[in-house]
Image (spheres, rainbow, N blue to C red):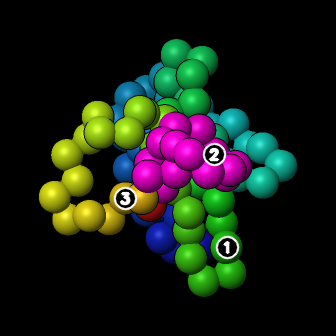
Amino acid sequence: MELYNIIKEFILRLDDTIIIKPKKLEIGFAYKNKIMVDIHLQKKALKIWLNTSFESLEDSRLIARNVSNIGYWGNGDYEI
């Protein structure tokens, strides 16, 4: 839960208009009424989905996974 709070505060500080949209299985963060990040809380981990198409980010540390061709709960093609 501590990691979620750190990430939540970071996201909310990006812009004053970002709102939290709780859903059944994850928590969405919306900017201009579009979900930009989804976070799924697990017992000992977080799953984070970034709402952007695959190959639009430079991931030199290889921490993101391409989920564009598999089923998942969040929005976008990146899962961290």
Residue 74 circle label: 2
The foreground one among 17 and 39 is 39
Q: CA distance from mark 1 to mark 3?
A: 18 Å
Judge from the rendering whether residue 2 lies leftward or rightward of residue 25; answer left or right.
left
Q: Position of residue 62 (x, y in %)?
A: 26, 64
Tell me which corner region of the image, top left, top right, bottom left or bottom right, holds residue 57: top left
Judge from the rendering whether residue 48 lies leftward or rightward of residue 21; answer left or right.
left
User: Label 2 is placed on what type of residue?
Assistant: Gly
Per the rendered image, the range of residues in magenta is: 66-79
Q: CA distance from mark 2 to mark 3?
A: 14 Å
Q: Which residue is mark 1?
A: 42
Q: Residue at x 65, y 59 (%)?
A: 40
Tell me which corner region of the image, top left, top right, bottom left or bottom right, holds residue 55: top left
**Residue 41 counted in the magenta span:** no
N-terminal-most mark, 2 or 1: 1
Marks 1 and 3: which is nearer the front?
Answer: 3
Circle 2 Cα neighbour tier, 10 Å, few/some/many (<14 / 14–19 / ≥20): many
Query: Dot 1 lies on which element?
Result: loop
N-terminal-most mark, 1 or 3: 1
Q: Position of residue 56 (x, y in %)?
A: 29, 34
Q: Which residue is mark 3?
A: 64
User: Label 1 is placed on what type of residue?
Assistant: Gln
Query: Dot 3 lies on which element?
Result: loop
Q: Quadrant of the N terminus?
A: bottom right
Circle 3 Cα neighbour tier, 10 Å, few/some/many (<14 / 14–19 / ≥20): some
Q: Is residue 36 above or below residue 33?
A: below
User: Label 3 is placed on what type of residue?
Assistant: Ala
